[in-house]
Image (cartoon, grey):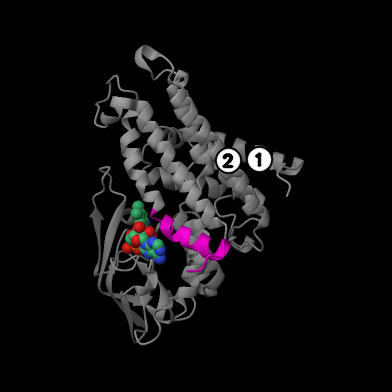
Amino acid sequence: MKLQLSDEDIAFREEMRTFFTTQIPQDIRDTVAARRELSKDQIVRSMQAMNAAGIAVPNWPVEWGGKDWTPLQRHIWHEEMQLAGVMPPLAFNASMVGPVIAAFGSQEIKERFLPKTANLDIWWSQGFSEPDAGSDLASLRTTAVKEGDEYVVNGQKTWTTLGQYGDWIFTLVRTDPDVKKQAGISFLLIDMTSPGLTVRPIELIDGGHEVNEVFFDNVRVPAENLVGEENKGWDYAKFLLGNERVGVAPVGSTKRTLAQAKEYAKTAGAGGTSLLDDPLVAAQIAELENDLLALELTALRVVANSADGKPHPASSVLKLQGTVLQQAVTELWVDLAGPNALATGAADGSDVPDLARVATTNYLNYRKASIYGGSNEVQRQIIAGTILGLRG
Ligand SMILES: Cc1cc2nc3c(=O)[nH]c(=O)nc-3n(C[C@H](O)[C@H](O)[C@H](O)COP(=O)(O)OP(=O)(O)OC[C@H]3O[C@@H](n4cnc5c(N)ncnc54)[C@H](O)[C@@H]3O)c2cc1C
């Protein structure tokens, strides 16, 4: 195993660093640095700037805008964007539905959707989970019944992230109720302006509106919106979820927020003194830095060993430890902010530092990270079974 970057990779890293720190609008990077929510417009502008430079969807086939990069170059691209405070391209488009359409869709569906998906002219939502189908996704009950050249869809999806912005939703629907549950599922693309489709917000503990419920009441969908073959949707979903897991170890952004926390700690003590002089704080930060370094090296090892673009089983380790550390850093922020962490509603002009005001909402919001993308308990089961060979 060689963990030293080659001269070529160092040059590539510089190219990415320069792009992300100079070509992504500053207001977007400032919002990320302040740990505040990006608006729809900011997310669209950020992805469109990357797409204009040809680097929004490097994991796609080259003919649809992908890059012939090595896994290591893709990793560097992803790390550098996070270190620069740039939001990665919208995952629903770039790492979920895009690769599925490119791999399994008809030529007509590819031409119709891929260019608009890469440029975020279409904002996709992910309609997989249902109230009784989360980790056990194959139990989903939303039905699609073929009537002539249309499917009639009935049922409910839940936890649809940013569904309030969605133009289209890619769904898993039951097209055959009489076979083994995995064998009767299809992958259907649905226009979110269709009559009978309703999006309702779910209120979150941090006061934000990030997730939704989506209801389908006799929604009529043209049969040509089916991706691949009917009843093969489970295969496409497994392909998609493998990609999703690789992208959820946010080493770069966690490093950036930890560095910010350390900087903040320098003057966060009583009377502007340094909290870094407190041995407990210093030890906590040093431990997190070491754990992040270990995760970074593990990520490089996984990247070095992933063949043919297929996710390595160790991607579950990255998801698990990546989110554990992401949550640990949000907890550190609350500790450093002290009583100021309670001041989430402080008005503009208050003495409470900006980053202290968002500490608690961030802490609460990031409880989600160990649930989505396959819960951490489920990742532990995968690691135990496929890596450690501990089958129960
Ligand atoms: C913020 C957020 C955004 C999301 N966005 C989307 C989205 O855009 N689109 C979408 O389709 N879905 C989305 N999800 C849904 C997400 O994929 C599910 O929440 C996740 O799959 C877990 O399912 P569940 O919530 O139904 O929990 P359950 O599956 O009901 O699990 C409940 C508990 O049991 C544990 N558990 C379940 N099975 C096992 C097992 N086999 N071994 C050990 N423990 C187990 C789980 O870890 C968990 O602690 C989102 C979720 C969150 C929190």
Asked whether residue 374 is drawn in magenta, I would say: yes
Picture disc at residue 80: 2
Asked whether residue 87 is drawn in magenta, I would say: no
Residue drawn 58% across and 60% down? Answer: 60
Mark 1, residues whose alpha carbon is within 10 Å: few (<14), some, or many (≥20)? some
253 vs 179: above or below: above
Tell me the quarter of the picture where residue 315 sits: bottom right
Q: Amino acid at mark 1?
A: Arg
**Where's residue 252, x and y in %?**
53, 41
Residue drawn 34% across and 33% down? Answer: 359
Q: Are marks 2 and 1 in contact (CB under 8 Å)?
A: yes
Which residue is nearer to you in this view: 322 or 106? 322
Q: Give left or right: position of 47 versus 149.
A: right
The magenta region covers: 371-392
**Where's residue 339, x and y in %?**
28, 25
- Residue 171 in sight: yes
**Where's residue 185, x and y in %?**
40, 78
Q: Give left or right: position of 77 versus 149.
A: right
